[in-house]
Image: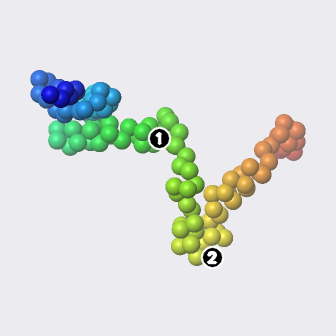
Amino acid sequence: MAVESRFVVIRQGVEVETFMDKKAADDYDKMLDMADNLSEMFEQAPVELSEEIREELSVYLAQNRECVLVALQAKKAKVQSSKAVSAKPIAKTLSDDSEAENPTPKESKTKVASAKLPTKKTVAKSKTEAA
């Protein structure tokens, strides 16, 4: 006879989901808690949302928590390896004229890094020149 451990997420006395490992069940339960909190927040919002839309939106945002945190600038976006994402296909689709007008991210970084910030002396000179 085989023994299986199952972890069941129960909400308001109803079985919501069954998992084979505890971490997945805990993660799902945490996501549902976040969705409940978001739903309560949306209920108090000045925008009127139907209960169904509010529930769908709150679950969606809770499931995409990492993206929401990046969008809110509460967390930095993870940098993907150059093997996974390559800018070459994008560059090939651009015409030569648009590439000259819109530098690639690497070129724009170089320009920003090489730009000189005003020093105390430069600021003092510009203040005396203005007077």
Give the quadrant of the C terminus: top right
Q: How busy is the neighbourhood of tag 2: few (under 14 within 10 Å), some, or many (20 plus)?
A: few
Give the quadrant of the N terminus: top left
Residue 43, by quadrant, is top left
The residue under the point 54% across, 67% down is 90
Does 18 sit left or right of 102 as displayed?
left
Q: Nearer the viewer, residue 3 or 49?
A: 3
Q: Which residue is mark 2?
A: 96
Numbered circle sitting on residue 62: none
**Which residue is the extreme one toward the top?**
13
**Image coords of residue 129 (percent x, y):** 87, 45
Does 89 sit left or right of 33 as displayed?
right
**Disc 2 and disc 1: Cα gap in Å?**
33 Å
**Image coords of residue 35 (percent x, y):** 27, 33
**Which residue is the extreme one toward the left?**
13
Determine the secondary structure under disc 1.
helix
Q: Of label 2 and label 1, which has the lower sequence position?
A: 1
Residue 48 appears in the picture as rendered: no
Q: Which residue is mark 1?
A: 70
- Amino acid type of the residue tagged 2 in the rendering: Asp
Q: Nearer the viewer, residue 21 or 127?
A: 21
The residue under the point 11% across, 23% down is 13
- The answer to whether residue 102 is above or below residue 59 is below
The residue under the point 38% across, 37% down is 65
Tell how many labels. Answer: 2
**Image coords of residue 22 (percent x, y):** 29, 27
- Amino acid type of the residue tagged 1 in the rendering: Val
**Image coords of residue 120 (percent x, y):** 84, 36
Q: Nearer the viewer, residue 61 or 13?
A: 13
Q: How is the protein colored in the picture?
A: rainbow
Residue 121 appears in the picture as rendered: yes
Determine the secondary structure under disc 2.
helix
